[in-house]
Amino acid sequence: MQTHKYDVVIVGAGGAGMRAALESSTRVRTAVLTKLYPTRSHTGAAQGGMCAALANVEEDNWEWHTFDTVKGGDYLVDQDAAEVMCREAIDAVIDLEKMGLPFNRTPEGKIDQRRFGGHTRNHGEAAVRRSCFAADRTGHMILQTLYQNCIKQGVEFYNEFYVLDLLLTDGPDGVQRTSGVVAYELATGEIHIFQAKSVVFATGGTGKVFKTTSNAHTLTGDGMGVVFRRGLPLEDMEFFQFHPTGLAGLGILLSEAARGEGGILRNADGERFMERYAPTIKDLAPRDIVARSMANEVREGRGAGPNKDYVLLDLTHLEPAHIDAKLPDITEFARTYLGVEPYTEPVPVYPTAHYAMGGVPTNVEAEVLRNNTDVVPGLYAAGEVACVSVHGSNRLGTNSLLDINVFGRRAGIAAAEYAATADWVDLPEAPEALVVGMVESIRSRSTGERVADLRRELQETMDRNVQVFRTEASMKEALGVIDELKERYANVVVQDKGKRYNTDLLEAVELGFLIELAEVITLGALARKESRGGHFREDYEARDDVNFMRHTMAYRAPVTEVDNGPRFADEVRLDYKPVTVTRYQPMERKY
Amino acid sequence: MTATVEENTEAKPGAVPTFEVTLRIERYNPEVDDAPHFEDYRVTVHGTDRVLDALHQIKWDQDGSLSFRRSCAHGVCGSDAMRINGKNRLACKTLVKDVNPGKPITVEPIKGLPVEKDLIVDMEPFFQAYRDVMPFLVTTGNEPTRERLQSQEDRERFDDTTKCILCAACTTSCPVFWNDGQYFGPQAIVGAHRFIFDSRDDGAAQRLEILNDKEGVWRCRTTFNCTDACPRGIQVTKAIQEVKRALLTNKF
């Protein structure tokens, strides 16, 4: 076991983690820990753009962007946070340009902008050109640009270090303070203790609780799981975004930019069905509405294909040169994976699990909350792992790339400033105990069940029961399966017993987080007897502002031991937190 | 062993047939093995399955100790470059049906970097070469308050090399790199090209100086392996030639 000491430790090297590192590393001694290599992070898979009211191509302002974000999130957005994000969006884009990001340009040489779902002029009048982009690889360019600037600045990375525990130490005032993290080094199997004054979680989402997902294999909710196991809350986990246009059967993302550039969704009859669901902005309605409309077309028998189980994304009326210039990657995905030529054939698409609106609750300074009001000193979170909440119950397209830049930057500054003045906090006794117990109990087990079998059952029940359409019965069925999987997980076995690059063991650990998070998602969804944004209850189809315009907060007492699976002292407990409303009172959400 | 395409008689029209295939994978775990060796695995795959899906099937259902890197699974993160039937490819971007599945498909780690375990290699020398070419924007003078302006033509000039995902397929397909691990390799030159030809950048002279080194661009023998290997379709050899020309003409 090795021990390291840094002022700030950042966990995760995607957009939020590296943006935080660029701020923190100029101020205090900083280390970035990632279970991958920085450039493998899933920020790189984001395609369409990053919205900011630059007004480079038409009139726009950040207040309209704020309104769209609040309305898009079906009024569950904390409006103070949305104001911060949309106001700082402009500098966030300019900062990236100055770091070297190769944005597409207007004829005058300014950053070009295009339309995107739910982004409108003057409070919903018409679609507005707000998304700053680099073809359909904006996330790739952001990830590369941030990594390049980390190289320039000499940021210290620990690659393939998997953080499995957060260390909190009881203070003399009875308040727990952050004292570090525990990481498992994939190359050697060695345990590392990182003592730190500040810890920033930027570990991304948990899309792998679902079977059909645009998310990477590695997005297993580790950061959320680690924090939750230490007795800290998770917020609004029932709100999961299903992106309308995943490649049918595969879930691979096809950017909303396809529709921003003029693509049209059609059912088996060739009908542009979004005209019925969102007469004003049609195919550019927010994602929850489009995904539900698509699922409804299929459910009512108007799906295309041999099994009538998808709809069609039609780009055939666009000029091939335009497609090549603006949508090169996604059209290549269609060719590579489905053998479909988008110049001449419509592309089969169906909703795919895409983004967790919920996560580790923070305030606008990215400080992690331990309840509705108080923060954990020294602990920060930013990006998809966090819930500020700027996305409410449905995130608008492009606002995730914005979120990681604005709140990643804020987290880096806040963590460094705290570390610059705070005293060192002693490590708890036997800081490695939980991780060693978890890893060794799995590695040493000689018989039991396969990780892949349990994971398949989990993902299948979540797709079947907790996806676009939910009911009390479907969610109870899912909870039944999850309960069973929790028991079976205590008996999970890996074939690889070695120390070196034991990815078998890694997947077993990840599965533990997935099962726990699936339970929190489903319990939150079951208790929320209304439909709002990404959460749609067939048994409660209306939004209920009287009873449910509030954030869900899920709690659990800290894990007591991890031999034979994590053991909690109690069951998940749900509480609620008020929504911050500054200027927009809830209205009916029509597009 | 041969693969047989089994037409499922109950399949609906348009459904994708499944078939059996053998993967011949190079295995090596220095904890227990003296030397690398090949092992055969038989799996049933769908017409739309990628080599990565086949590897997952083996890992998940047959042999959990099989080790490889992967993340996004659709060709944008660059984790799973490997030698498939002797050619560098991304396992997640290569459909099994497209790599002659009638015969065993060989899968080996990319060449020229130390093998850590099975298909996992030490990427550090590769990333070091990238870091050494100053792959970041260098500017002088005062910053404008808004964005720097750049014409569409100037933006287009370096578009091809911005697509790089650092998967190492090009560098580890290069015979010069196999024989001389000190050579920067195609990827690092691509990484430098992306900034040398960016109209906003003022660091080209320094980067060209670095690449003028004896282990720099002049080692390139224009074999075109790198261009063939690039899963992003980057004209790698062309980019290297443009860097050479910039060194000769001092124009960029």
Image (spheres, coloured by chain):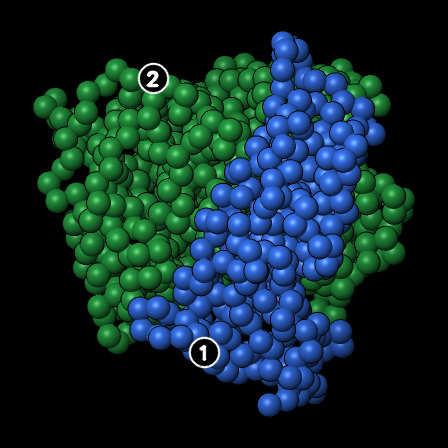
Q: Is residue B146 left or right of residue A449?
A: right
Q: Which residue: 13% across, 26% down?
A: A171
The disc labelled 2 sits on which kind of residue?
Glu
Q: Would residue A445 be visible to someone looking at this image?
A: yes
Task: Please identify the quadrant where the N terminus of chain B is shown.
Answer: bottom right
* Residue at horizontal 76 percent and vertical 44 percent from the top: B241
Which chain did the image draw in blue?
B
| Residue A542 visible (yes or no) | no
Q: Color of chain A here?
A: green
Question: Which class describes the residues within 10 Å of circle 1: few (<14), some (14-19), or many (20+)?
Answer: few
Mark in the foreground, 2 or 1? 1
Q: Is residue A67 left or right of residue A125?
A: left
Q: Secondary structure at mark 2?
A: helix
The spot of residue B52 in percent (x, y) is 56, 66
In the image, A425: left or right of A302?
Answer: left
Residue at 24% across, 33% down: A5
The answer for how far apart the CA atoms under marks 2 and 1 are is: 53 Å
The quadrant of the image that shows the C terminus of chain B is top right
Residue B99 lies, with reference to residue A567, above or below; the image says: below
Pinpoint residue B189: horizontal percent, then vertical percent: 65, 43
Label 2 neighbourhood size at 10 Å, few (<14), some (14-19), many (20+)? some
Q: Nearer the viewer, residue A512 or A534?
A: A512
- Residue B37: numbered disc: 1
Report whether mark 2 lies on the same chain as mark 1: no
Q: Which residue is mark 2?
A: A417
Secondary structure found at label 1:
strand
Residue type marked 1: His
* Residue under the point 35% across and 29% down: A30
Q: Chain of mark 2?
A: A
Q: Residue furthest front?
A: B214
